[in-house]
Amino acid sequence: MDPSRPVATHVAVRDGKILAVGGANCADAWGPVARDDSLAHAVLMPGLVEGHAHMMAGAMWEFAYAGYHDRIDPQGHLHKGMTDIGAVVARLREYSATLPEGQPLIAWGFDPIFLPTERLNRHHLDQIASDRPVVVMFSNFHLLCANSIALEMAGYSRDTNVEGVVKGVDGEPTGELQEMAAMFPVMRRTGVDFRGLSQKESAIRAYGDVCKHAGVTTVTDLFSEMQDEDLGALLAVTSDPGFALRIVPVLGAIGAAPQDIAKRAVALRGNSTDKLRLGAVKLMTDGSIQGWTARVKWPGYVGGQPNGIWNTPPALIHELCAAMQEHGVQMHIHVNGDEASSVTLDALEAAGRAHPWLGARHVLQHCQMMGPDQFRRCAEMGVCTNIFSNHIWFFGDQHAALTIGEDRATRMDAARSALDAGVHLAIHSDAPVTSMGPLFTAWCAVNRQTMSGRTLGAEQRITVDEALYAITLGAAYTLKLDAEIGSIETGKIADFAVLGADPTEVDPMALKDVPVLGTVSGGRVNLI
Ligand SMILES: [Zn+2]
């Protein structure tokens, strides 16, 4: 990733930083060197940077997995996917039998889009347990299904009139709850607590394990509550020299006045360390495309579903953007549907006119339906994009058939258009929505293959070099860390991914299979 020296055989490290790069003698001018050949069999890349993931990727495994795909947990155990509702019910019934009386049963990772014949509802979940609350989070974390007890605890009934509380033909809630306003009352009462899943010391360490297996040395937590005691736990864990991960927790812009959120972000910035970077915020706008809650432009969803749900209404998006821009707070903004992208770009443009700030580097996150016109606006305003490339493999077939149709699906997650427009690009997993693995994410952006094996939108493929840049320096740029990480250059932090093969040498279709052997963080080797 250093254009002046793209390949080297040796790297010298002092005090956790890169002293010199080149051949065997590259550091001799600095005095005696201790030579270490223990990684001579491996390939070192700059440590991989995951610009959009969530700390709960480690701790979700305290709950039952109910997903369609096979998944591997941070300890390396395989959890088999389940391909019909009957299998989910049977597995969770077994799990229920192991729980203490009355304890809520929480599962995660379920995705109805792979099971289109029947919608999961509270009657299925009542079969799992009728004497305890049962909550099944969907894989996108924008929807969930609750059993009858859990619905009762939240006070949901046929008389409820809350957007996102889905009702059946009988007028009763089906159990499906869409987006945050509808979900939170159930989550609060049953203990599905994103904060608890993120800020315990064990959760932070589990996140470290997830990252090490993926070759990631810098990771985000892209919606953090960051209460005072959370900060204490983060500082304690990251200051442990054996903890091999830099974390960028991003404050969720929710639950307070925009001006107060901005001031809090500025105050948090002062607590930053080498391994913990604070001060940015995350804005939610719309929902999820495969949940039909993303806000999309005309002609909308191919099945005629109503347009999606604003988690933050457009007027508030404008207010938040103006406040953050005024206080110099960088924003990461969730935009899935193309209407959400348009509203956000309008808000950023207005904020930029009111409070000019060159170098703000705000980042649109997901950007799944953005077209060339929107990327050109990003380029004009210096707005970065972090594209959800994993969607192409996991959901590409479903998007073509069920959500936005073949033509718009072929130009989803349009990394080629972004680069051609001159936009700074990162690509991401949104773990735990999909498994963390930047080399897999790069493989998605390079090959655009779907689960059925076809290529979805060949015109939007990017090269291996471009994809590797996106998972290192490209992502570092979106975090304003490109001066410190993202490439192997003298003066930067000695963070490396230790790989079993050279990703620039293998067949592009084998990029996802390049073995990750571990990481080097600040010069310390951590092999798996
Ligand atoms: Zn996310």
Image (cartoon, rainbow, N blue to C red):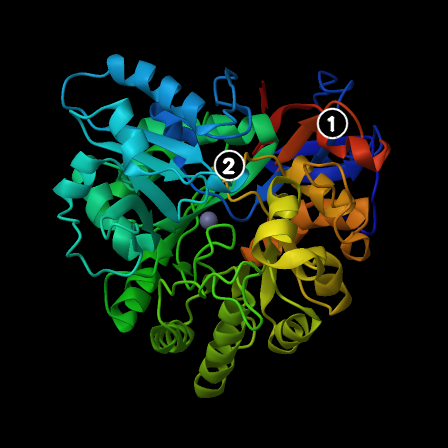
Q: Give me the residue at 67% from left, 68% from top.
A: 371
| Viewer-side residue, 430 vs 423 | 430
| Residue 208 to residue 51: above or below | above
Q: In which quarter of the image is the C terminus?
A: top right
Q: Can residue 74 be seen in this view?
A: yes
Q: Where is residue 234 in the image (x, y as percent from the top left)?
A: 34, 39
* Secondary structure under the numbered disc 1 in the rendered image: loop
Q: Give me the residue at 81% from left, 49% from top.
A: 463
| Residue 105 to residue 422: above or below | above
Q: Distance between the residues labelled 2 and 1?
A: 32 Å
Q: Give me the residue at 27% from left, 18% from top.
A: 96
Q: Where is residue 30 in the image (x, y as percent from the top left)?
A: 72, 36
| Viewer-side residue, 423 vs 247 | 423
Q: Which residue in the protein does label 2 denote?
A: 115
Label at residue 514: 1
Along the horizontal axis of the image, is 25 left or right of 388? right
Along the horizontal axis of the image, is 90 left or right of 519? left
Q: Position of residue 273 (x, y in %)?
A: 42, 46
Front disc: 2 or 1: 2
Badge 2, how many Cα within 10 Å: few under 14, some, many 20+?
Answer: some
Q: Where is residue 497 in the image (x, y as percent from the top left)?
A: 66, 32
Q: Which amino acid does label 1 sit on?
A: Val
